[in-house]
Image: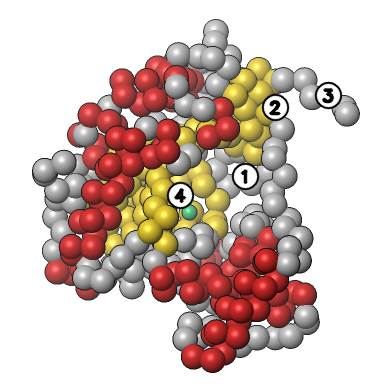
Amino acid sequence: MNEPIFTNWNAEHTAKWGKAPLSIKHRLHRHELFSFDALADLIERYPREQYALVHMGAQKERRLWREGDIGGMAGHAVIDAIRNGRMWLNLRNVGSVDRRYRDVLDAIFEEVRQNVPGYDTYARTSGILISSPLAQVYYHMDLPGQSLWQVHGRKRVFLYPDRAPFLTPEQLERIALFEVEVDIPYEPWYDEHASVFEIGGGEMLHWPLNAPHRVENLDCLNVSMTTEYWTEAIRRRQMINMANGILRHKIGLDPKSVATSGPGFWAKAALQAGVRRAGLLQKDRRARRPIEFRLDQQHPGQVIDIPQSSA
Ligand SMILES: [Fe+2]
């Protein structure tokens, strides 16, 4: 790939990268891999275990979350169903399914490294998210570094400060230990403290590590790409979250330090590694959700319930 993917990177972006929310322009929305034909083709050959199709509640309504199956429908029909429904399709880890998307991801982070000296990333993954008009992603935070790339449609993204009460060490520890991101407290007044970006095709967002965020689609079909990555600094933060979580939840202490160097850090690094190796963490991994519906071929946007066995 010869042309840069970022199209307006400047010194301000370099200074803010990872330290403040920022929006940079890109050209993926005009890339052939992100055309609707290419996406339809990708959907048709996507492995079942690598995608999630989720049907969700209206904006501000948190209860409904059901997983479904595309039911062997053609790619363009799946996209039409999403355009007419209230759901999202997450094509996870697209680089492992199609090498060409992996190459795009690698090119992106090579450009980041050229613009932000020393910003070396690894274990990078990307996913493509196709979501309905007015769909939403609830308030949450993530452990790896993250960016959001808007490809088609428009959405409003709320980015919150990476400090209490929006984000607490205890929340990060719980996510690290138990891999649960649900039930993170959110209050409408948080929005007064959010940086709000409305982004369209050709705009991406990056924010400080762990910063909470939520997303509201405008009234149009949305296609976005999410990228996740690790750096040595992020890996150390994760080890601290894990170790402090063990001290708090398993041993009943109240750890205060989040230092990522020095003797305290190395003791915690050894602690969390030992506990993990010994298999002492009862991972409350999100149970694999049942597949409760499939798309309705006759009525784009509607779904057909799959009867659940009572076993
Ligand atoms: Fe996220």
**Mark 3 highlights which residue?**
309
Does dot 4 land on a helix, a strand or a loop?
A: strand
The location of residue 18, given as percent across then percent down, is 33, 69
SS state under label 1: loop
Q: Nearer the viewer, mark 1 or mark 2?
A: 2
Vertical side of 126 occupied by 240: above or below:
below
**Residue occupied by mark 2:** 292
Who's the residue at 14% across and 55% down the image?
Answer: 8
Residue 173 image point, x, y percent: 63, 70
Q: Which residue is mark 1?
A: 61
Q: Is residue 53 above or below residue 244?
A: above
Give me the residue at 28% from left, 49% from top: 106
Q: Which mark is residue 279?
A: none
Q: Residues within 10 Å of mark 2 (few under 14, many from 20)?
A: some
Between discs 3 and 2, the one toward the N terminus: 2
Of label 2 and label 4, which has the lower sequence position? 4
Find out if the beta carbon at label 4 lies less than 8 Å from the nearest ligand 1 atom. no
Q: Residues within 10 Å of mark 1 (few under 14, many from 20)?
A: few
Q: Residue furthest left?
A: 2
Reading the image, the residue beneath label 4 is 215
Front residue (pair 69, 159): 69
Q: Which amino acid type is marked by label 1?
A: Glu
Q: CA distance from mark 4 to mark 1?
A: 13 Å
Q: Amino acid at mark 4?
A: Val
Please state, as top left, top right, bottom left or bottom right, where the C terminus lies in the image.
Answer: top right
